[in-house]
Image (cartoon, rainbow, N blue to C red):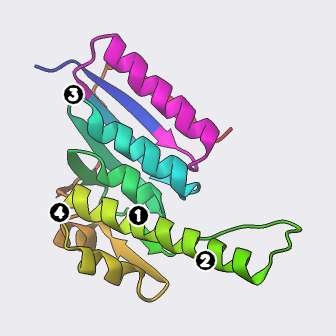
């Protein structure tokens, strides 16, 4: 039987929380764990950080089991989708929407605004391409989730689309190694 570790990630996707997650995963590999089980609930956050940690998860030489224990929003969908096996609590949900770009006291020329639009569009396309590749969904079907600016799927609806493999309550075995990551 594989030596599993459980990581509870209940946080936004920020440089700080992703660094903690990456460290926990790296330490697990270095300490001989043979399976990572990630119980995740996240309101999303940094698209670049989310895409990067998802790519790291996909590169791992051991199985990664993702379990949605609450909500998976925005770029957290890509992190969730990076799991080889994907489970969800019956009352969990998934939110898909376009990319938000935040600016404080910024001034842009028309050309710079156009560049910012292209960046936002590319990030949304990168999210869609990653989701499509990770869960095996047709790219046009993934793009449909973004079509109305926001789509919320229940666990069962996500299962019907192939995002979730199994709808079941999460359980953590007694005596197992657990790492918890929350917001800073």
- Res 163 → quadrant: bottom left
Query: Residue most toward the top?
Result: 31
- Res 58 → quadrant: top left
Give whichever of 101, 169 is nearer the camera: 101
Whether the residues at callouts 1 and 2 have beta carbons within 8 Å, the answer is: no
Whether the residues at callouts 4 and 1 have beta carbons within 8 Å, the answer is: no
**Viewer-side label of 4, 2:** 2
Look at 25% across and 51% down and name the residue there.
87
The stretch of residues the image draws in magenta is: 9-35
Look at 20% across and 72% down and name the residue there.
161
- Label 4 belongs to which residue? 136
- Label 3 belongs to which residue? 61
- Label 1 belongs to which residue? 127
Numbered mark located on residue 117 in the image: 2
Look at 41% across and 70% down and name the residue there.
125
Residue 98 lies, with reference to residue 73, above or below; the image says below
Residue 160 lies, with reference to residue 53, above or below; the image says below
Whether the residues at callouts 4 and 2 have beta carbons within 8 Å, the answer is: no
Q: Residues within 10 Å of mark 4 (few under 14, many from 20)?
A: some
Spatial separation of the CA atoms under disc 3 and disc 2: 37 Å
Check the picture and name the quadrant holding the C terminus.
top right
Numbered mark located on residue 118 in the image: none
Task: From the top left corner, tell me how far across and down residue 64 is, in percent.
Answer: 26, 37
SS state under label 4: loop
Q: Is residue 30 magenta?
A: yes
**Viewer-side label of 1, 2:** 2
């Amino acid at each position: 039987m594989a030596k599993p570790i459980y990581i509870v990630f209940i946080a936004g996707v920020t440089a700080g929380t992703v660094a903690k997650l990456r460290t926990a995963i790296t330490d697990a590999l270095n300490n001989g764990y043979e399976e990572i089980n990630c119980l995740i609930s996240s309101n999303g956050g940094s698209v670049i950080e989310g895409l990067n940690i998802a790519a790291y998860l996909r590169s791992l030489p051991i199985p990664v089991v993702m379990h949605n224990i609450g909500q998976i929003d925005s770029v957290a969908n890509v992190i969730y989708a990076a799991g080889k096996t994907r489970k969800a609590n019956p009352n969990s949900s998934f939110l898909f929407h376009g990319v938000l770009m935040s600016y404080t006291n910024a001034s842009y020329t028309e050309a710079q605004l156009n560049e910012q639009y292209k960046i936002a569009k590319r990030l949304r396309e990168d999210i869609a391409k990653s989701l499509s590749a990770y869960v095996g969904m047709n790219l046009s079907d993934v793009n449909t989730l973004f079509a109305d600016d926001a789509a919320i799927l229940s666990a069962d609806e996500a299962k019907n689309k192939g995002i979730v493999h199994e709808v079941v309550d999460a359980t953590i075995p007694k005596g197992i190694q657990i790492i918890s990551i929350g917001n800073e």
